[in-house]
Amino acid sequence: MTEKDRFQRERERLNQLVMKYANKETKRFFSLDRQTYEKGALDEKTKEFAGLVASLVLRCDDCIFYHLIRCREAGATSDEIIEILNIGLIVGGSIVIPHLRRALARWGELVEVPGSYESQLQRARDILTTASDFSKATQKLCNELRQRNPLFDWVGFYWINPDNARELNLGAYSGEPTEHVTIPVGKGICGQAAERKETFVIQDVRLEENYLSCNPAVLSEIVIPIFSKGEVIGELDIDSHTEAAFTDEHREFLEEVVKIIETRL
């Protein structure tokens, strides 16, 4: 199930809940909302553009995602969406920038087709197979992943200390510096992933008791172990300033990236 499907299913469930308890005024408002976006003097796409700008200025991420879905269904192009979001940025100012980032990330998810991560996977193969210096290759890969995926606010590698199998050491990374250059195996999300030898996807780090905070802005995290001969030798760690940023598609894509890394080791 895609993020769009999950969003629409949950939205429909909650709408049904509202209608269960709604009085006459609430029902009239919901009906008016639907009628407002129907074709009239302005076509539906133009009205959805207006709704998208208003949602961005009001900084409502759910509203933004809903109008992006409706814009997509109305035939909006990526060039049109960028121009419309720029209008919202001009009207709302710099305070809307975090919502602009998330809007562009969500739009990217809506316009992607199955297998569209293949270009990034091919880029990862090229970086890792052509570079003579593995450390420089992983740095380049960190930069690439962060630049091409707006929800990835920090991308980095941790490697098992060859002199201490119970310790992870920070390697290449892209994003703000972190104080956690050394992490004990079993401690925090990275340490747990290494100890259990499995991918960890944390959609809200605030709910985790065993969590090492490196940046208060981080809300979600994904950690994929890197194996050699059946043992964990490192990890790909990605933080996002967006809650519930990582979808099943992200996990599958990043696990494929790690497989490419493993073939290079």
Image (spheres, helix red, strand yellow):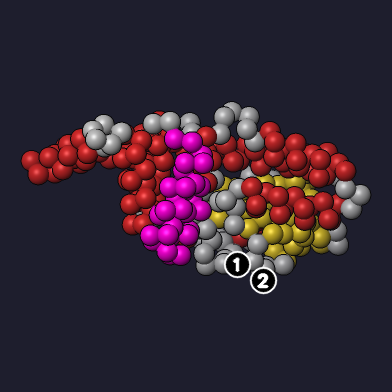
Say few, some or many: other residues with alpha carbon within 10 Å of mark 2 (under 14 / 14 to 19 / 20 or more): few
Q: Quadrant of residue 8?
A: top left
> In the drawing, what numbered circle is on residue 179?
2
Q: Amino acid at mark 1?
A: Cys
> Residue at 75% across / 36% down in the picture?
122
Using the image, tell me which numbered label, if any, was put on residue 214. 1
Task: Provide the major secondary structure of the magenta segment.
Answer: helix
Where is 118 relative to 136, above or below? above
Q: Judge from the rendering whether residue 74 lies leftward or rightward of residue 15; answer left or right.
A: right
- Residue at x 46%, y 53% (from the top left corner): 86
- The picture places residue 44, in percent across and down from the top left corner, at 31, 34
* Residue beneath the point at 39% across and 61% down: 92
Q: Position of residue 121 (x, y in %)?
A: 72, 37
Q: Which quadrant of the view contains residue 59?
A: bottom left
Q: Is residue 60 left or right of residue 240?
A: left
**Span colored in magenta:** 76-104
What secondary structure is found at the residue carrying circle 2?
Answer: loop
- Which numbered disc, 2 or 1, marks the residue that appears first in the sequence? 2
**Within the magenta stretch, is there residue 52?**
no
x and y, in percent, of residue 209 in the image: 51, 61
